[in-house]
Each structure stands twice: as C-alpha cells, then as structure tokens.
Amino acid sequence: MDDDHRCLTSDNGHSQHVTWTLLVDLIRRLADGADGGVDGSEGHMLRNQPLSAACRSSVRIYSLLFPCSRFLFFGCLHHFSSVFSIMATQTLTQNAQSTLHIFNDAKPALSYEQLGQWETSTRVLASLVNDHMLTVSPCKCPDSNVQQLGVILQPKVGTAESKRTRGVWIGVTDAGARLTKPAADATAVWPGDFAAPVFTVIDLGEKQTYSLEYHPASLVGHFRGLLTEEPVPDSLFDQVRAELSSSAANQREHSCDILRPWPTLESRAIDWEQTLYTGHPLHPMHRSLFAQEATKQIEPKDIGSLMDAHISFISVPGSDVRINGTYRKKLQPLLEQFGLDAFQAGQVIIPCLTIQIPAISEHFPRAKVLVKDAVIGRTQSSLRTVSVPNFAHDLKFALTCKIGSALRTITPWTTCAATEVSAVLKETLPQNVWLLEDVAAISGSQADFNEAKHISCVIRENLEDRAAAQSEVPIVCGAFAEIPPGEQECCAVSLFGLNTEEKKMSWLSDYVQLMHDALLPSVITHGIAFEAHAQNVLVRVDKTTKAMKGCAVRDLGSIKIHMSTLAQSGYELFSAIEGSFVTSAEEVPMWRIIHFCLYENHLNVLIYRLGVDRPKAWAMVRELLNKFFDDFAAKNGGALPENGERFRKFLFEPVIEMKAFMVMKFASKHRDYEYVTSPNVLLS
C-alpha cells in the first residue's frame, strides 16, 4: 500500500489529521502484519511494528470487542486500506503540516514521504552551499504557477556550460529572503532559509526543463560529477546518496511515531528526551542509520523500536576488558535483581544492547550470554544512552551502527578518561551547573581500539531524583526547538507562554544568559569546552514557576580540553590516552567547538524555530556575550586574562571556520574534521 498519506482539511485540522493518520497508519501496519502472517497474538505483532500508542490502544480495544471476527478483520484489511488511503489523501492542513515539517516553512501540501525527504534535502542543500560546492543566486521559479521568492543553486565545478546547465530551484522563507539580494554568496545558509517547493532544472538555452523533486538523493545525484574538483568514486557517491535516503526514510517514521501526547512539566526527563524526532538540525545525515559488521540492520519501518532498548547481560574473562572507576560496585544493584553477582572471580559481567551481541561475539569470542533481554529501558535522544527502570544510573552502550556521521561505538579513549574528567569537572563547574557524571566505564582490553570499542559501556549519573527534590524537571534543550503535534510554533512557545515577540525575546535573553554563565567560564578558567549542542545540555525548569533554574551537561567523550590551561589551573589528566579527541595542545580547537555547537547549532536553530527577528535576536546575543566577558573581567580585577581576550576576539571574528559536512562525506571522513570559511553567524 502507498505510504503517501495526506489528511483532510477541516477547522479542527490537527485532530482530524491525527485521526486519519492513526487510522491509515493502523491499517497499513496491520495489513503488513497480515501479509507476513499473524501468529495469533496482536501483542507479538505490535512489539515488532512501530505503532503509535493510540494505534496500539485501538488494536487492543478492537480485539477485546470483536475477538471472533479478528481473522475476518485481517482478511479485509487490504481492501479497506485502499479506500481509506484515497479518503485520507487530501489537502494537508497547516496545523498537520507543522506536526511533521519542523525546521522550515514548507507552504505546499506535502505527504509524509515528502516531508521526511524535505527535512533531509534542506540540510544537504544548505551544506553544499556552505561547503562552497554550490552557488546561490536570486531566480524566478521555472514553474510560472509558483510566485514565491526563490533561488537557484548551481555547481561551482565544471565548465561554464555545465555549471549553467544544471541547477536546483528552491523557495525561501522570510528568514531566507536575504538570499535573493545581491551578494547572497556572502552569507551562510541554513535549512530554515528554504521553503518548498524545490525543482531540479536543466537549462539548455532555448529549452529549459524542470521537475518537482524532494528526494535528497535525487537532488544530490542531479549534480553528480559537478560538486568536487577531484572526482568522487561512484561507490562513495552512491553510499552518500544511500545515507541521505536513509535519513529521509527514517525521518518519515520518526515523524509518525511522535503523534503522541506531548510531555508536560510533570513528565519525566526521559519523556522529554524522546521528543527530539528531527535529529541533528544541520547535518544532512541527521537520521541516517546503517548497521555495520555483524549487527542487524534496523529498517525504517522498525525505527520506532529504538525507543525501547532491550538490554542483555554477558560475561567475559577479566583479562578481556579494562575497567575504570567503581564499575562493579555501581552495577551490582542492577545485577542482583537478576540473581547475578558483579564480583564473581575471574569474570566480568557487562550489560549490552541485545542488538549488539553479534558484534561483541565477533570481537570477543569468549563472551557468554547470561540473561538475554533481561530488561527493557527507554532510549534517550542519542539512541544509545538508556534510562533503566529500577536503577539509579543511565547506561551508555556501544552500538555498531553508523548513525549520522559516525559509528556509535565507544573507544577506550573515552572510557579510560571519563571518570577522571568527571572528577575534575565536579570541582570546577559553576554551582548552578550540574554534571551528569560518568561514574564508571568498561571497554575491551585489546591494543586495537577498533576491536575494543564494541563492548564498551559507560555508567552515567541520573539526576532526575535530585531535580525532583527541588521541584525541577531536567529538559533536554533540543526539546524546546521541536514543534509538538498540532502546534504552529516550537515547544518553548507553548511551554513558557511566549505568545508575543516581546515575550519570546525576553525568554531568549534569559536562556542565552543561562547558557553563557554555564558553559563559558570553564573555557577561560580551566581550558574546558563542552560540545554544547542542544542534545548535550539540559535545562532544569521549576515545575511551579516555570523558571529556568540552571543547567546540566553531559557527554564527556566529546568535550575538548586545552591541556596547558588545565595545568595552569592546577589539574592534570593522567588517564588520557595519546590520540584522545578530548585533549588538545592548541586553544583554537576548544574555541571552535564552543562556536559551532553553541552558536551555529544550538542557538541558531532555536532562533529560527522561535520565529523571532533574526538580526534583532543576534544583536541581543552579541550584547549578552559582551556582558559576560565584561562581568568576568570585573570579577578578575577589571581585566580579562590573556586567554579570555583571545577567546573573545575569536568568537567575534567576521569569518570563521565551520564544519564542512559534505566535504567530509565525499572524503569519507568523520573523526578527522574538515572546515571551510564562512561568515560568522554571531554577526548576522
């Protein structure tokens, strides 16, 4: 059956959208189940299909009310599903559209399939422009029926004729209108600048042909051979296109899965974690997922199953692993629930994702499965960190899957330094900044980290009970920028009552100041920079007053530490292994992480999704940033330390180096970053 569902127009657009979405999704899933054979248990089928909660409830209610007619029901599904699909394929309301289309203002009615493609396409087109592979020029739409502002994207590489011949026309939002003015190439481009529709264009002079196209793989394929000076091997080019296709397909499924009640301030932190359904807001591979080696591929239709993580317990000889921190002691409360002893002689018990067992077995042949699918936890926004029921800590697992840009295993570079870095940070962070401490970790003992990384596990502090004791809930920052089902604007607007431009700007001012006070001091005082994108920072919100009380930070494997500044503050890292991503002999890599993660990514995306005036918002951010440095200087006897002055100057440079996502993809790199020069978003 065709997945290209639309929904009916009505005054109550969202409720009818959800009704038809659930109905068609239910029928499609059940029809798929009928195709594959139903084993006599709706529960079995539902565990293997990412149905929304409402769909699951519908199936259970139907089964209770009509148990005798169940087989007739399944037998008729294909016939009725076609009818319902036709009925549901109507104009998409603006409310329904905002349910799925998040970052951009896609005005035409788009299907679920197209919306998933659109989220990926806007990211890859923006990246190709920023990576200096495509130019931007104002242009009328080749389709005379489309009257909106737009731009033509054309390749920089190739002959004059080939560069003129092939292009992609795409509409622009109000925020992107600057791209239609002279010197459009002098500005960075972001996904939020684009609006549907998008056309591939072939201009042969007297004859111009164009075609409506939303699929990112097709858009990139349109420029095959014209994006890089050195030809990209066909196998690599096709792999990049496959990853883009994966992103689009998985985004469609994540969008369907989010049709559930949105969390409130009374919800748990894990409920907020699972609202981040659009993935990385800038990376073209924001939702791509490819299993590697022996790990089983997770198909788009099964993406919803990732929200619930099946955890198993395995054991290996102690000589096969290296332990950091009080690993056994921290894990014992979980193991004893299953009659296991963390302190057994000669063996080490390790929790792992059940899906990871084949990859572990391949690299650790002496591993034995003790309890398979012992417990089911709920995955956080990273998909590999899991909140475990009846356990005081979260578990971060190795997963031999390429998610986004990298393989999501955990190397000994991370596990060996995690506990020592945690100890340093707990002493040095500002008082209102909580650390989700990595209290213990384990990895393989092999000298080859490419083998050792497949079994790793990090035991991380869970701060929810501590926050609850203060009537606070920790909310992952990315949730504020997502748009809840049925809403026109991002979550922050409804959660904090930001119904005017003035209220939005006031809240944004408080938010930016909170980020500065939490994340910038340690850069100057100890040479420590957090990867402060919106998935790694949480805001603690008062459940009663809705005041933002402070921050919490996590993911110590992605921070950057300038070792000289750290030493000058009286600390050393003895556990950091040579080649670690965390350590740096230079200041610039540390500053670059702050600029990219906090400003280009975190705040830039939030400003887009709040819908405030961008020049005004960025002027406010600059004012608050200068205030931070001035206040820091005042506390330091009236002057910034020399490294503080250098940091300030770096942040305000008119041209900066930004991550070149597509340059790295076409060079098959993910750990060794490539950069391109770009106008500084802080000066927007």
Image (spheres, rainbow, N blue to C red):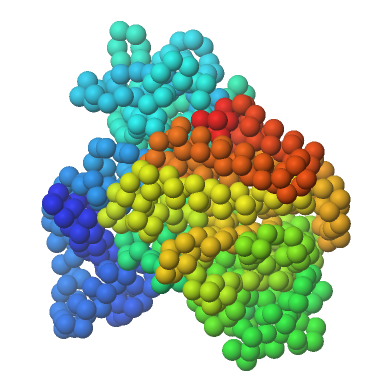
Is 538 positioned to the left or the right of 578 in the image?
Answer: left
Q: Nearer the viewer, residue 518 or 350?
A: 518
* Total labels drawn: 0
x%, y% of residue 510? 50, 51
Quadrant of image for the N terminus = bottom left
- Residue 453, quarter of the rendered image: bottom right
Task: Mark yes or no: residue 373 visible.
Answer: no
Is 24 positioned to the left or the right of 50 in the image?
Answer: left
x%, y% of residue 588? 74, 38
x%, y% of residue 398? 63, 63
Q: Residue at x 83, y 61 (%)?
A: 575
Q: Residue at x 29, y 53 (%)?
A: 487
Is 668 positioned to the left or the right of 137 in the image?
Answer: right
Is 521 positioned to the left or the right of 568 in the image?
Answer: left
| In the depicted structure, whether residue 324 falls above or below residue 636 | below
x%, y% of residue 666? 59, 34
